[in-house]
Amino acid sequence: MEPYIHHHDDSETADFLEPAVKAKLQAVLSQMWEAELRLRTGRPARLCPSSTGPCAC
């Protein structure tokens, strides 16, 4: 029966997106939550990556 079951609730098996797109989205979400952490802890200067130059915060 297992070959015929499609697990909708498991995020790792939800394969609507290509692996490369999925990896990019996971990276963006990680950066988003990191920025949220910096905002909530009162460290907005760390929001912008250093590779983009000075932050406009």
Image: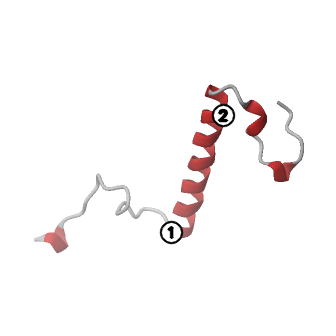
Q: Residue at x 63, y 27 (%)?
A: 41
- Percent position (x, y) of residue 38? 66, 34
Q: Residue at x 83, y 53 (%)?
A: 51
Q: Vertically, is 40 above or below 26?
A: above
Left or right, 43 with reference to 18: right
The answer to which of 4 and 41 lies nearer the viewer is 41
Residue 19's mark? 1
Q: Vertically, is 9 above or below 40?
A: below
The answer to which of 10 and 15 lies nearer the viewer is 10
Q: What residue does disc 2 label? A: 38
- Percent position (x, y) of residue 32? 61, 42
Specify the farthest residue to the left: 1
Callout 2: helix, strand or loop? helix
Q: Quadrant of the C terminus?
A: top right
Name which residue type carries label 2. Answer: Arg
Q: Residue at x 69, y 25 (%)?
A: 42
Specify the farthest residue to the bottom: 3
CA neighbours of label 1 inside 10 A, class few (<14), some (14 to 19), many (20+): few
CA neighbours of label 2 inside 10 A, class few (<14), some (14 to 19), many (20+): some
- Percent position (x, y) of residue 50? 82, 49
First reached walking from the N terminus: tag 1 or tag 2: 1
